[in-house]
Amino acid sequence: MMSVFSKQRPGFTVIEVIVVFLLMVVLSLAALVRITDTGAELIGDHDRLLAHIRYAQSRAIRTQSTWTIDFSGSSTYQLEQDGTPRFLPGLDTPSITIGSSITASDLNFNSWGEPVNDSGQLIGSAGTVSVTDGSDSLHITIERDTGYVHD
């Protein structure tokens, strides 16, 4: 004689359904956080500009000439050596456009890597470059005497 409880019915148990549902909730929340995180673009633009400023400074020292970062628009800049636009390695245009807004005046580095004004004199105080995405802002500072570039 067969027992009523010995039959196996097809389907999932309540525990299995709850576990799968909880996994789906956790994964969808993780995806939602990644999609709505707009700060990543701002940080990326800031870091790229910081690297380009340091690159221009190192090229000024290496080539013993003046290198400039010319901020030609609110989100566009280019590197110049003695007034001549220069390409960054791996790029096919001297102009770089980022998704964030930039607030700064042109940056010049002399052959010692020091920040100077257009006439070649040391800048009066530390220079600041601001990168903004509308709600948040990150800053890059160029120290007056040493040319140290940091955030």
Image: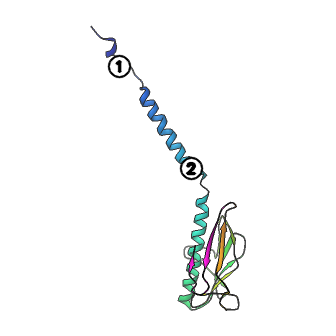
On screen, 60 above or below 3? below
The disc label shown at residue 31, or none = none
Precedes in sequence: disc 1 or disc 2: 1
Inter-mark Cα distance, 1 to 2: 42 Å
| Residue drawn 69% across the image and 80% down it | 106
Q: Nearer the viewer, residue 36 or 65?
A: 36
| Residue drawn 52% across the image and 39% down it | 25
Q: Nearer the viewer, residue 143 or 82?
A: 143
Dot 2 amino acid type = Val
Give the tally of numbered discs. 2
Q: Residue tagged by mark 1?
A: 8
Residue 68 % position (x, y): 64, 83
Marks 1/2 in contact by CB < 8 Å: the verdict is: no
Residue 13 % position (x, y): 41, 26
Q: In the rendered structure, does residue 75 fall within the stretch colored magenta?
A: no
Residue 44 % position (x, y): 58, 65
Q: Residue furthest front?
A: 125
The quarter in which the N terminus is drawn is top left
Q: Residue tagged by mark 2?
A: 33
Q: Residues within 10 Å of mark 2 (few under 14, many from 20)?
A: few
Question: Which region shows up in magenta?
Answer: 136-151
Dot 1 amino acid type = Gln
- Secondary element under disc 1, as helix, strand or loop, is loop
| Residue drawn 60% across the image and 82% down it | 143
Q: Nearer the viewer, residue 6 or 117?
A: 117
Q: In the rendered structure, does residue 137 fall within the stretch colored magenta?
A: yes
The quarter in which the C terminus is drawn is bottom right
